[in-house]
Image (spheres, rainbow, N blue to C red):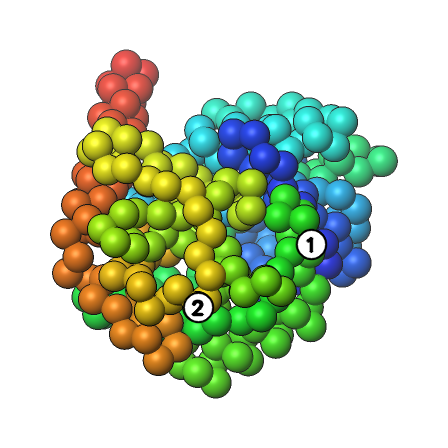
Amino acid sequence: MSLIIPIDFSFTQPLYPTPIFRYRQVKCDAAFDYLFVNGELRPSYEAAIFDRIDGNSVYEVIKLIEGVPLFFEDHMARMQRSAALLGAGIEKPPAQVRAEINELVEKTGCADINVKLVWYPGKKGSIFLTYFVRQDFPDDGAYRRGVHTILYDGERRNPQIKAVKTSYRERVRAEREAAGAYEALLVDDKGFVSEGTRSNLFFLIDHQLCTPPSDAVLLGVTRRHVMALCRVLAIDVQEKMLHKDDLNRIEAAFITGTTIDILPIGSIGRLQLASVGHPVIQTITRAFTEEVSACIAAEKTGSSREAAAKN
């Protein structure tokens, strides 16, 4: 399967920042034989459409559970805002995007996967793609034991601009694979740990839950939902930087992301952490799982009512 090769990403701070990325070359990374191109279902092997996406574009990756796109409205709002930053607007109604996702589920028979949305405001007309992509989902054991992570010296010159070149991605992947690590945590030139290369970071020090400041990281939808849940649960979250010299003060830690949800960290390098059984992480994880279940149930109830009304 060919992979997209991104050259430059950037985020904007308000609400849900969405990557604005520039491509030199784009290859089809669709997981199945079908994708939607401007509302038309087409074979994914007709990948020539990707050759036209060579300028500023915005994208979203949304997790599907039982055919329900999780936090769909949040992702679409973030995508719309990023388009606005390019001085344009996405005319495609969210309802049409949902309909395309539903049809892909029917066509592929796959209801638990990630869906990717790509919008390109081309000079000859905009392009909107909807298709399924395979992701590196952690297995159940990762949640039971926690994942191994490593530190990686590298920072984003501007925390709202995600500059990722192919060589960078390959170096990080090589480092992770050599260490048997699931994620690499970025360390800046001052020794502060900010985030994962594909996730947000939370950690507990002196019984206090902390996460790097919003203006220092690329904000994720899952991170925002976790922050909101913590307010409901009366769990105080402080936004503060973590220096690598203070790693031994960490009691527990976890990372968040669209694909991984809330994933406990079992180790950072040689440092072992008892994250899986930590009561704060367990409480947040239970609340997040309940929120996800409620979202799925609400979506399915709504779909059933719509179907009944049509009949």
- Please identify the quadrant where the C terminus is shown: top left
108 lies left or right of 234: right
- Mark 2 lies on residue: 245
Whether residue 61 is situated above or below residue 124 in the rendered picture:
below
Which is more N-terminal, label 2 or label 1? 1
Question: Picture quarter containing residue 123?
Answer: top right
90 lies left or right of 130: right
The residue nearer to you, when weighing 72 against 160, is: 160
Q: How far across and down, in percent of the image, does residue 283 sit?
A: 17, 45
Label disc, if present, on residue 157 of the rendered structure: 1
Residue shown at 31% from the left, 64% from the top: 249
Q: CA distance from mark 1 to mark 2?
A: 22 Å
Q: Does dot 2 land on a helix, a strand or a loop?
A: helix
- Please identify the quadrant where the N terminus is shown: bottom right
Assess disc 1: are there few (<14), some (14-19) or many (≥20) residues with their C-alpha within 10 Å of its C-alpha.
few
Question: Picture quarter containing residue 253?
Answer: bottom left
The residue nearer to you, when weighing 75 against 167, is: 167
